Amino acid sequence: MKWSNSALALVAALTFGTASCLLSVPVIASDTSPVIDVAPQTDVNVGLFVNLPDRFNPHQAKLLTMVYEIAKEDGHKQPQVLQGILLQESNAGEKIHGKGSDCYGIFQLKLVAAKEALNAFPALWEEFNFRGKSDREVISKLKRDERFNAAIASKYALVLSRLGYDTIAKLALAFNAGPYGAKSKNPRTNRYAKSVLKNIKSLELAHH
């Protein structure tokens, strides 16, 4: 996939804004949380089952399973990173910014991040049945279509990984701060990145 100009455009566009908006949501599970088996809720059956603590309601479980499956299909080496970010951004769809916010949907994405993902992966326009390519339509789909929002988040994470944000901590930091903002921060000490890692750890504990 050629996207030689997109990296420069992304850095310039995010100089004054982040890719996503952080919600301060305590989402860390206890080590002893019971688990439930949740079947994948996607159009493509890849035989994936995800064990999730039963603190999640059916909608949260559906979203966490969906984003893992999308990330895995997109080739993420550690697809659980999308689950950790989803928990941090909206507590898996339970806390989303309301009217007036410029962060949209379950991943609390900004328009600039969505457009970068769409530019890097133009097949998304057709896959999600866009009538045109207006900002208004992109924002509408980010708000109303959870699968589109998750697909954009996964593709945007691929863009970031190609810019060198290739560990969970680095990727989480860049997802929140943008690639320009992330350069001045340490992923080992950054609060957002550490919270995403804790979210992932809480899910991994469910498998033991």
Image (cartoon, grey):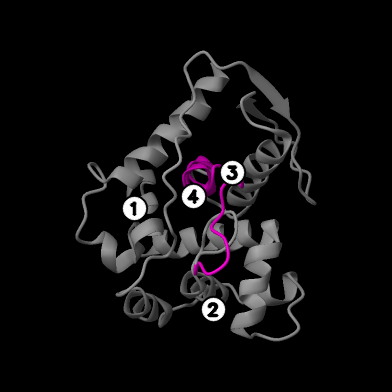
Mark in front: 2 vs 3: 3
Label 1 belongs to which residue?
Answer: 173
**Magenta stretch: residue 91 in it?**
yes
Label 2 belongs to which residue?
Answer: 119
Query: Residue 145 vs residue 17: left or right?
Result: right
Q: CA distance from mark 3 to mark 1?
A: 18 Å
Local SS, label 4: helix
Q: CA distance from mark 4 to mark 2?
A: 23 Å
Q: Which residue is at a point 62% across and 61% down the rendered structure image?
A: 149
Q: N-terminal of the two: label 3 or label 1?
A: 3
Q: Which residue is at a point 69% across and 57% down the rendered structure image?
A: 147
Residue 193 location, x and y as percent? 34, 45
Q: CA distance from mark 1 to mark 4?
A: 12 Å
Residue 153 position (above or below residue 91) = below
Q: Amino acid at mark 2?
A: Asn
Residue 168 position (above or below residue 2) = above
Q: Amino acid at mark 1?
A: Leu
* Range shown magenta: 80-102
Mark in front: 1 vs 2: 1
Q: Tell me the number on the disc at residue 89.
A: 4
Label 3 belongs to which residue?
Answer: 92
Mark in front: 4 vs 2: 4
Q: Amino acid at mark 4?
A: Glu
Q: Tell me the number on the disc at residue 141.
A: none
Local SS, label 1: helix
Q: Amino acid at mark 3?
A: Ala
